[in-house]
Amino acid sequence: MFKQGPVPAFVHGVIEYLAANGARLDAPDAQGRTPLDWAAGVFLATHPPVPKPHTIALLERLQRERISAAATAATTTTTPPTRP
């Protein structure tokens, strides 16, 4: 029977690198599955899902950070210097 082990540690580094360089964390593949779907183990119809909780937590954290950074950038205004 197919058994998938834990996610290798370097995979999280790759995910963080891609996210830091602008990769879309919500981009679906050709079948409509997002990275979060893959982390939840929803990718093989012939096998039951094998969730990867640490990867799910990482993706959710990165998405929250991205949303927070975008909100901060949207509310931060730069006031031009005044001339005397």
Image: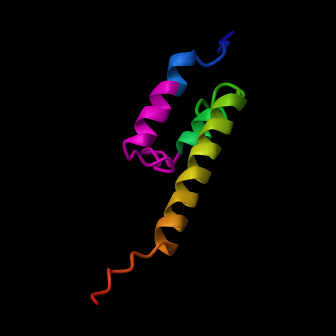
- Which of the 4 image quarters holds residue 35? top right
Residue 83 shown in magenta: no
The vertical placement of 19 against 47, above or below, is below
Q: Residue at x 57, y 17 (%)?
A: 9
Residue 24: percent from left, percent from top:
43, 49
Q: Residue at x 54, y 67 (%)?
A: 71
Question: Which residue range is magenta in the image?
Answer: 13-33
- Picture quarter with the C terminus: bottom left
Residue 23 shown in magenta: yes
Q: Main secondary structure of the magenta part?
A: loop
Q: Residue furthest left?
A: 83
- Picture quarter with the N terminus: top right
Q: Residue furthest front?
A: 84
- Which of the 4 image quarters holds residue 23? top left
The vertical placement of 68 against 4, above or below, is below
- Which of the 4 image quarters holds residue 83? bottom left
Residue 49 visible in the shown view: no
Residue 26: percent from left, percent from top:
51, 50
Q: Residue at x 49, y 47 (%)?
A: 25
Residue 5: percent from left, percent from top:
66, 13
The vertical placement of 74 against 3, above or below, is below
Is residue 77 rendered to the left or right of residue 72? Answer: left
Count of number-bearing discs: 0
